[in-house]
Amino acid sequence: MSDSPTSPVSTKSASSRLAVWLFLLGIAVYLLTRLIGLADFPIYFFTDEAIQTQQATDLVSRGFRDGAGVFLPTYFENGGQFNLSLSVYAQLIPTLIFGKHVWVTRGTAVLLTLVAAASLGLTFKDAFKSRTWWLAPLLLAAVPAWFLHSRTAFETTLMVSFYAAFLAFYLRYRSDHPEFLYPALIAGALAFYSYSPGQVIVVVTGLMLLAADARYHWQHRKAALKGLALIILLALPYLRFTLTEGGAQFQHLTLLNSYWVKPFSFWEKIGMYFVRYLKGLNPFYWFWPNPSLIERIWPGVTLPTWLFSTQFDLARHTMFGYGHIFWATFPFWLAGLIRCIRRFRDPAHRTLILATLAAPSGAALVDWGITRGLVFIIPATLMIALGLEMAATWLRSKWLRLSRTLIWLAVFAVLTGFSFWMMTDALTNGPTWTDNYGLDGMQYGARQVFPRAAEIAKSEADTTVYVSSTWANGSDVLLRYFADGIPNLQMGNINAWALDYRPLDDSILFVMTEDDLDFIYSCGKFTDINIEETLAYPDGSPGFYFVRLAYVPEILDILAQEREARQALITTEMLLDGRQVTVAHSALDTNEIAHAFDGDPTTLIRTLEANPLKIVLSYPEPVQLQSATLLIGGPPTRVTVAAYLAGDQVASQTQEVGQSPVTRELTLTFDEQVTVDEIQIEVLSVYDGEIAHVHLWEITLK
């Protein structure tokens, strides 16, 4: 018997076709709101974006080896820490085909986030049996924090996308499809390798799912055992990295100033962890606009930071006035959360709760930040979808004449309209949401400064262009990204010319910030200052100055006086190993000399501008000395330790080491134990000049 046009089967088929079309349209909306004006918002192009493509370029040029010669490395170095992996490999083919362009780097990342959009839709369809499964990618498109970060090449979005795929495949596995365990584990591994906080999040999620679904895993133990073998295989790249770079994790936490590597007790660290962990579960953090309506009406109002912790987020990671998740969706999220709690025994609902609980676990190792906890958006979006579906069902129960199709088409229209409105607002008003365009703000200027500097360098072969590095992190990476291979275009700060005499004439052009300009006017070392052009910030104020200048006639006398003052040592008293010791040392700009002897490998001292760093310890009574161990940084370094007694040198040792991506210990041991009353220590940064910052973490004398 054939189906009539109004038969249930025909209606269901039409509804399914409509859902597919709405899903595809939702994906189109998602893509359009990511790709339109992609290079223009966010207004910055950050070092952490450029490094992905630059590392991919370097990998190819080295025959798919990293700087240390490792073939197909698991992780790549970024700012002294190994925190890049999959995102570099993802940029390989697009970079080889299209070259280094902002739209290529960001566009590649955008396309990969389709994994998240599609995974959410399929999870809602298969795990929650929803007829409105097309809703999920539209909801994701309308999440402000995701809108901003999915338009960047930050590796956090890659991790979140594969985490969404992991949940989608896992829930298929959990629905009596054991074969989906294997793609779930692969997706989980991809999330693990994508972003360092993802390592903790994936492991915590996996352990919770292992415990929560233990009976089910036992029922499918054949698949589970194969899955265990697959996990071991997927862990091999990480094992290789751990064996070759064993101290990298500690170094990473040290650079991030994590409390885990500081001398707190275990229970103090546990307490600190849970304080930070709870920040990530705070609904006010996720849904409260920043700045809020209250702050706009009363600009001077002080809100409690323990509740409204969005106040700590950097402007470059926030959508002005939106909240990380749009505030109007909060009731639906709450309804979805309550439903998940009530149906906790159901695997799909329980998994959303567990994913929510796992979301802050990685960020809490350091401190909360939206990029580290962005994965919270995945379970939150599905909960909002559940809440919306419940609201629509309630609405139809009150107004029976309302068409279900009409309701959902209206929801589709509202979400689509909001996504495009948010995109238009960001492209139009986003450039002036803040006027802090410098180092601690937007770090604006990479797309504007380097192409213009390269244009000048190419057109004026006799001019060397120096670009200031004071306005952005890792600006040397940005130079290589935008203008690699131009010999007369380099990074260089004007303060280097102010500290030491260097050739300076009209063949040198400086690109500097307003702070740099203020410095050259106030320091009294330069004259004939000629500003040739400026590049404006988005609000129209001057951002970058292209300047030629000359030294004042008496510059050599000024620098000689400064050099004499710089080499003078500062003398202080300090308690060392129970003895009062007189310490003379080079001037420092980071911490005090006592931090080099405090037994804490996470604290450091840094010279103000002297290379080498000199430390002289004078004891009131002679002591015994056999060795000195110094914790030094990564640059090539030469360390000298000399021991004296009554003014005569009784022992001396010198040791030099090359470049290293991590801090390392250097031990200098005398041939025999000696009696001393003075110890002289010099730490020289080998390839730097007399004026440089020298870092030292710890000194241990035995």
Image: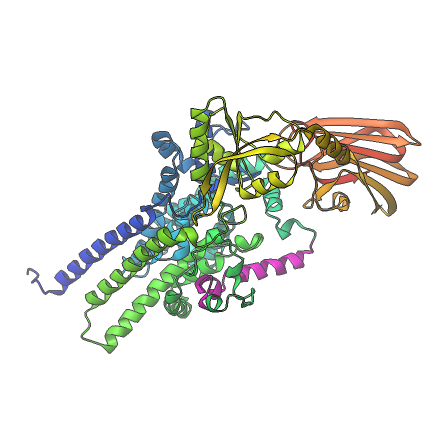
577 horizontally vs 335: left or right:
right
Can you give x and y, in whole percent of width and height, for residue 666 in the image? Answer: 72, 33
Q: Is residue 476 left or right of 618 when viewed as pictured?
A: left
Residue at position x 62%, y 59% in the image: 272
Which of the 4 image quadrants contains residue 242? top right
Q: Residue at x 78, y 40 (%)?
A: 700
Does residue 86 appear in the picture of this structure?
Answer: no
Q: Nearer the viewer, residue 229 or 164?
A: 164
Q: Position of residue 243 (x, y in %)?
A: 58, 36
Which coloring applies here?
A: rainbow
Residue situated furthest top in the rendering: 462
Is residue 607 rendered to the left or right of residue 319? right
Counting from the top left corner in percent of width and height, residue 625 is at: 85, 35
Q: Residue furthest bottom?
A: 398
Residue occupying the point 22% across, 57% down = 19
Q: From the image, which quarter does the C terminus lie in?
A: top right
Specify start and end residues of the magenta stretch as a single range: 264-293
281 in relation to 519, above or below? below
Specify whether 28 is left or right of 99: left
Name the residue located 34 percent from the left edge and 30 percent from the top edge. 97
- Magenta stretch prevailing secondary structure: helix
Which image quarter holds the N terminus? Answer: bottom left
